[in-house]
Image (cartoon, rainbow, N blue to C red):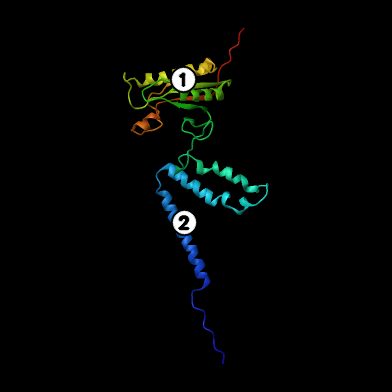
Amino acid sequence: MAIEEEPEPGIPEWVVTFGDMMSLLLTFFIMLVSMSEIKEEKKFQAMLESMRRQFGHEATVSNILPGDSTPRNSTMSSLASMGRAKRLDIMRGGNPVQAVSGESPQVQTIRPGTSSTTGGVIFFDELSDTLSEDTKLQLRQIAAQVRGKPQRLEIRGHASRKPPADGDKWALAFNRAEATMHYLLQQGIEQQRIRVSSAADTEPLDNGLNEENRKRNARVEILMWDEPIATQTTL
């Protein structure tokens, strides 16, 4: 009579694999919950960049293969740097506005649609209509983009909620637009292309009440409309 051998003590191998899988799933869900609790944009971006480095192309075996030839997916590293991990306001779904040169709060489309494109946005001290050296540099860059084109330019001044000394926000916003216009004329922009307007504090970018929020509304928008200027002919 054959004696059946007793099974070796311990748990089946599949239980270990199953336990590892459940541990990974639990870790994944904990990570998702932790990400939803991060309220600071810089920390959120740093965490995404760290995850990209750990799980992206840099961590693959193909990235450390010897030789001068790069794998076909080597472009994924540069593409990832331009993806959602680099988006502004990613915690709120990404920044939906289009810009002339990348995502920046200083260059954005204020009025979406096909009726206009954007030259850019420059910012002022809250109660000032004087161009700083930084804004002059921005205006020179904007002028290089729109110079020589036939479309109409609108220079639209804005103000924050804080009233100036004379209480006239419309005049403050218009003075900002006028100062911007004069500097663009010095950069070779044709005067017949320019239209100057003032919106005072009626079109805020930020509805916050603290000083940093209000400063974002002390600005001038340079809009290039899909409106060619009329050509003058001499008889």
Q: Residue at x 49, y 18 (%)?
A: 183
Seen in the picture, residue 92 relative to 189 is either above or below; the reply is below
Observer-nearest of 232 and 4: 4
Q: Residue at x 38, y 29 (%)?
A: 215
Observer-nearest of 50 and 91: 50
Q: Residue 3 placed where, x, y %?
A: 54, 89
Give, as a three-letter code, the residue at label 2.
Phe
Q: How many marks?
A: 2
Observer-nearest of 7 and 190: 7
Few, some or many C-alpha atoms within 10 Å of disc 2 (few <14, some 14-19, many ≥20)?
few
What residue occupies the far bottom of the structure in this picture?
1
Q: Secondary structure at mark 2?
A: helix
Q: Residue at x 41, y 49 (%)?
A: 36
Q: Residue 132 placed where, x, y %?
A: 44, 22
Quarter of the image with the C terminus is top right
Quarter of the image with the N terminus is bottom right
What residue occupies the far front of the structure in this picture?
66
Q: Image quarter for residue 165?
A: top left
Mark toward the start of the polypeptide (1 vs 2): 2
Q: CA distance from mark 1 to mark 2?
A: 52 Å
Residue holding disc 2? 28
Give, as a three-letter code, the residue at label 1.
Thr
Q: Residue at x 48, y 66 (%)?
A: 19
Seen in the picture, residue 76 relative to 139 is either above or below; the reply is below
Query: With 26 as the anchor, is 160 left or right in this view?
Result: left
| Tag of residue 180 | 1
Q: Are marks 1 and 2 in contact (CB under 8 Å)?
A: no
Q: Residue 44 placed where, x, y %?
A: 44, 45
Seen in the picture, residue 129 relative to 91 is either above or below; the reply is above
